Image: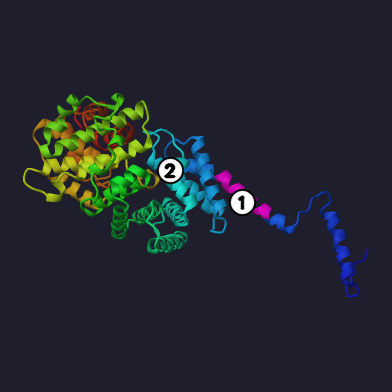
């Protein structure tokens, strides 16, 4: 059979169309051909479905704690609702996944399952704000993009985050310059902007926005009034106030008296019997008797907090709002002692070490992204300066120093610097007669120390660094 080139010069447009139709009928025999518009829509839906199927595995992989089905369902619901309400604002499958990630980590930080009851996104005001306020919506997208960048080790500002934050600034400036009455929503947006600044470690910029936030709250009747009406927004202001005071070494703008008393679980008047420790045991503890009078109330609060959290981890879980309020209250109580603000004086080194250790203890429950502890360089430097020089011969005070150094290690007050810490702890362990971790763990029960949060890391440090070379 010989082959010939087809001469197409005499084939008109109609015949060419018939030929192509005939060929494709054979190729697509038995197949249902969709129109182009439907095909593109199907591809988009398939990409969303793929992201949806993949997100559960990603979130469960990222999660360092337990996560039940309802929480994952609610995080999906949150992201999907935003996509429906703001279809033109770039809610791509990738951003939807980041929003679910943000929801999960926010819930994990605000209500850690080790200590708190299960909760849902719908219960949180910021979820409603993101759905109904465009400025807060853009803040939410920016924070979701920023969190995703940090989790991949990228500390630079995401272009997506910068774009949405610019839009949030524009919208909140319009709200602030309008003649309308100042609303809680505007306060919440400024609080969210402050969170974004702290996320990137920009303390100076965060302090500027925190000062503005404080002024806005004052115009709304003050922080106590805001806490009564809308504690979720007030909680953001409280946390910002404490974090910036620790970061900058400044005095907080609010105080423990501003925290709603009925939400403080260690308040002996309002505390349920199940969580109320025996005060006599606390006031006769080594730690309480070893410190000066001006630090003893803060010691009692830290011991009560330790008792409550240790009991919650083993028995009845706490309400997330009560958990956060109690942490905030203890944080303020520790900052309100005058030792750190007056500097190191003769005879105060021991008490300053205890105060720094208690701040470190409280900070182990105030998580950052991915449950990473928030680092305060000023506190790290103060702790290192005091801990390296302190020396005690009295056995009870030696035990206090041993606890302070160990909680400093667990709470990142040492920043992993073990060159001076290990020899000092080994010497103290030898003088105190510790040979095994169960002996150490039993002694730590008299101090601010929660097994669910500190035991595993403390035991690992003991076995790998301290137990070696100790006499039998």
Q: Which residues are magenta?
A: 41-54
- Residue at point 51%, 36% (across, down): 70
Give the image quarter of residue 283.
top left
Above or below, comparing residue 271 to residue 195 in the picture: above
Q: Secondary structure at mark 1?
A: helix
Q: Secondary structure at mark 2?
A: loop
Q: Which disc, if any, is residue 410?
A: none
- Residue at point 86%, 65% (across, down): 17
Q: Is residue 292 visible?
A: no
Which callout, 2 or 1, points at the residue further toward the start of the chain? 1
- Which is more toward the observer, 47 or 420? 47
Above or below, comparing residue 115 to residue 195 in the picture: above
- Magenta stretch encompasses residue 49: yes
Label 2 vs label 1: CA separation? 30 Å
Give the residue number, with chain letter if any, for mark 1.
47
In the picture provided, is 206 more to the left or to the right than 284?
right
Q: Main secondary structure of the magenta part?
A: helix
Q: Are marks 2 and 1 in contact (CB under 8 Å)?
A: no
Position in image of residue 216 (x %, y %): 32, 56
Q: Is residue 87 visible?
A: yes
- Magenta stretch encompasses residue 110: no
View extreme (left): residue: 346
Give the residue number, with chain letter if any, for mark 2.
124
- Which is more toward the observer, 403 or 1? 403
Above or below, comparing residue 349 to residue 188 in the picture: above
């Amino acid at each position: 059979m010989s082959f010939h080139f087809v001469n197409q010069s005499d084939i008109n447009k109609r015949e060419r169309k018939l030929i192509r139709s005939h060929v494709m009928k054979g190729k697509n025999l038995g197949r249902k051909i969709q129109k182009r518009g439907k095909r593109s829509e199907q591809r988009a839906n398939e990409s969303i479905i793929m992201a949806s199927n993949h997100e559960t595995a990603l979130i469960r992989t990222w999660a360092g704690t337990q996560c039940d089905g309802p929480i994952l369902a609610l995080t999906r619901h949150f992201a999907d609702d935003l996509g429906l309400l703001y279809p033109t604002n770039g809610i791509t499958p990738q951003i939807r996944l980041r929003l679910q990630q943000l929801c999960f980590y926010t819930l994990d930080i605000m209500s850690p399952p080790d200590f708190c009851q299960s909760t849902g996104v719908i219960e949180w005001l910021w979820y409603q704000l993101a759905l109904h306020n465009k400025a807060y919506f853009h803040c939410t997208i920016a924070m979701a993009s920023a969190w995703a960048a940090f989790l991949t080790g990228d500390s630079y500002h995401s272009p997506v985050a910068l774009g949405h934050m610019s839009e949030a600034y524009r919208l909140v400036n319009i709200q602030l310059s309008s003649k309308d009455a100042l609303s809680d929503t505007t306060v919440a947006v400024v609080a969210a902007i402050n969170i974004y600044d702290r996320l990137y470690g920009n303390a100076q910029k965060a302090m500027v926005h925190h000062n503005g936030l404080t002024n806005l709250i004052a115009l709304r009747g003050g922080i106590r009034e805001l806490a009564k009406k809308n504690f979720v927004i007030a909680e953001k202001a409280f946390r910002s106030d404490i974090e910036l005071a620790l970061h900058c070494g400044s005095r907080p703008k609010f105080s423990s008296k501003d925290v709603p008393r009925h939400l403080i679980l260690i308040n002996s008047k309002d505390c349920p019997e199940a969580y109320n420790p025996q005060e006599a045991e606390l006031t006769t503890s080594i730690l309480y008797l070893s410190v000066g009078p001006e630090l003893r109330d803060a010691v009692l609060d830290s011991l009560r907090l330790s008792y409550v959290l240790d009991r919650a981890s083993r028995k009845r879980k706490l309400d997330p709002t009560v958990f956060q309020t109690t942490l905030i209250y203890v944080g303020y109580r520790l900052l309100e002692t005058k030792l750190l603000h007056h500097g190191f004086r003769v005879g105060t080194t021991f008490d300053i070490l205890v105060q720094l250790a208690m701040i470190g203890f409280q900070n182990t429950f105030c998580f950052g992204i991915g449950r990473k502890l928030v680092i305060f360089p000023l506190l790290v430097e103060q702790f290192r300066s005091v801990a390296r020089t302190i020396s005690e011969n009295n056995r009870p005070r030696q035990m206090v120093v041993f606890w302070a150094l160990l909680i400093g290690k667990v709470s990142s007050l040492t920043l992993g610097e073990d060159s001076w810490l290990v020899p000092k702890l080994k010497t103290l362990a030898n003088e105190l007669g510790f040979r095994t971790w169960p002996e150490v763990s039993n002694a730590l029960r008299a101090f601010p120390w929660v097994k669910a949060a500190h035991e595993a890391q403390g035991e690992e440090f003991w076995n790998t660094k301290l137990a070696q070379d100790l006499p039998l």
